[in-house]
Image: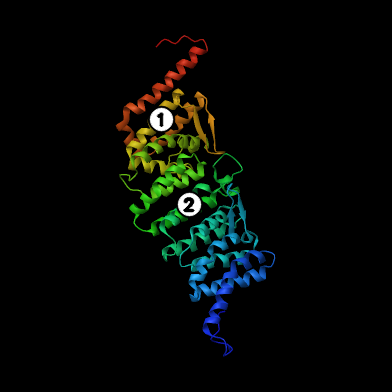
Amino acid sequence: MLFLKTYCVSPNTSDSEIADFQITWIREIPLLLTRSGDKNPSVTKAVLRLQLHLGQRGAHSQELDNMQYLLREFYSTCSRDGVISYGPFMKLEREIQELSICCLYYFSVMNPSLLQSITACCLSLDLDPSLLFRFLEVINCAYVAGYIQIADYISFLITLLSRYQVSSESGSLGVEICEKSNTGHFRSVTSVVCSCLHQIGDDHLVFKMLEKAAIDQISNKLSLENTCALLRMIITVDSKPTKLCEQSILKLGSVLPGYLIDVVSSFGEEDIGLTNTINTSRSRYYILPCFILFYGSERILNNVLNVMSSFILGHDSLTFDGKNGQAVTIDHSVRILAVVGIFLLMNADARVWKILQCYKKETDSIPQNIFTVLVSRLSELGFNIII
């Protein structure tokens, strides 16, 4: 297959016959990988080495490209019901898994269906964390080399950040919990993805391509970690003033209050500004993307203030619980404490505090509404309030 020039070939064998034999072999590679899989890893390794060498030598690139659809079964397939069936790849030794990842670089054009199959493996919690970074590295190199379409690549990155399941042993977001879960790992993945965005090309073009998809995912009320990751993706390629369209600004204005409340609810007093500032608190990681959006668009901040004011009065009875992905009803006292916590964080940031001075009507409405709620509660308890 690889070194025909080195060895003796029957003089009765033509070049076209040799090419036919090679093509036949190449077309069998996906089937061989699926059937041998983890049951016969030595065979799987040998076949992958053959695939890798063929790619490196540039031999029969068209045939290699054509086998991608069948190769999906080696990584994963998805049924019509959305159920993922993982192929042999997930059960192989790490060395063989890495060999198969290397092979991905040598498709002259990566098929979107194969990229989708690979994405499912990347989202599996059973995948070795280091291999996820290897996937990111190889796929990024393939994009830079022109082997992956920009729309497919951006879709891959958004899917990874929006659907990755971040597990935690507690509702707390403290450092000690991050070490016991995959939270720290996902933050590193987010950092790598944001770094990859800068390598795609013009930030304005990239922003326009990812804006709608990323905002739509955020509007679906994802977990706290996934939402934060997507916000970080947006601010990586956004500018000041923001490039967000009107619809995106409105959507963020309605979603961010619930996100901020989840952040505040996940930290103790020392982390929301009562003793520390936003620059030193652990909440900085989650809050900073919102503040950067406020810097770029005061209208987003204005919308957030209006939603929070309405939230205190109970006009919006639902908020998002980022720990389990469910909407829950929140009592007035909890609403008030949450909003106060958010304001403590805002006031701890000099730039946000300065912007707030321009929205005195909106900021004043919040304590007024808090007072209204307190008076109403006291009246319900039989106290006569004289104002």
Label 1 or label 2, whichever comes before in sequence order: 2
Q: Residue furthest bottom?
A: 11
Residue 57 seen from this side: yes
Which residue in the protein does label 2 denote?
190
Left or right position of 176 against 202: right
Left or right position of 366 against 165: left
Which residue in the protein does label 1 denote?
307
* Residue drawn 61% across the image and 43% down it: 169
User: x, y (%) of residue 228?
Assistant: 47, 44
* Residue drawn 43% across the image and 46% down it: 214
The part of the image, by quadrant, that contains residue 74 is bottom right
Which amino acid type corresponds to the residue marked 1 in the rendered image? Val
Determine the CA span between mark 1 and mark 2. 29 Å
Left or right position of 126 against 284: right
Which amino acid type corresponds to the residue marked 2 in the rendered image? Thr
Which quadrant does the C terminus fall into? top left
